[in-house]
Amino acid sequence: MEERFFATMIQCYFIAFGVMIGGSIIGSIGSFATGEPPFTQMHRIARGLHIWAIVAAIGGTFDAISNLERGLIDGSTIDMVKQIILIVIAMGGAQTALLIIEWLIQKEIE
């Protein structure tokens, strides 16, 4: 059980990371094709994609809410703690991608 959770943590991190990097780069290619500045658009896309990368990494919002509800109502605190850990790990992946995008475009992301 613990081995599978560790693998899920790693997957959550890299899914959030990949959504941020891939979405920002592909979106900026689209803006380049339409004549807009790609780095400025990459900056905007990365800021807007942050929360969606976390949601994609944890597998959607309904699973997360049901696991948190099970932890609160049924007294299964280990499920609640695991879900919180997965959310924090996904936030770390998205934040790492934001940092790399910031380095790439040489612009501060608020």
Image: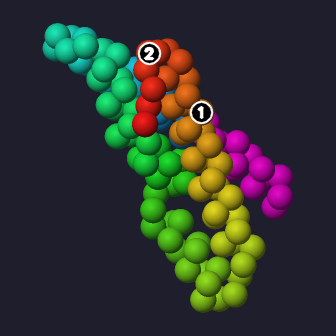
Q: Is residue 74 visible?
A: yes
Is the residue marked by circle 1 packed among few (<14), some (14-19), or many (20+) residues within 10 Å?
some
At x 43%, y 48%, the residue is 51
Total labels drawn? 2
**Residue numbers of the magenta segment:** 1-15
Q: Amino acid at mark 1?
A: Thr
User: Picture coordinates of residue 77 (x, y %)?
Assistant: 72, 78
Q: Quadrant of residue 11?
A: top right
Q: Quadrant of residue 45?
A: top left
User: Picture coordinates of residue 2 (x, y %)?
Assistant: 83, 58
Instruction: Give the quarter of the figure containing the N terminus.
Output: bottom right
**Rendered view: 14 above or below 62:** above
At x 70%, y 64%, the residue is 82
At x 63%, y 53%, the residue is 88
Q: Amino acid at mark 2?
A: Ile
Is the residue marked by circle 2 packed among few (<14), some (14-19), or many (20+) residues within 10 Å?
some
What secondary structure predominates along the stretch shown in magenta? helix
Here the colouring is rainbow
At x 40%, y 32%, the residue is 46
Residue behind mark 1: 96
* Numbered tag placed on residue 109 in the rendering: none
Residue behind mark 2: 105
User: Picture coordinates of residue 56 (x, y %)?
Assistant: 47, 48
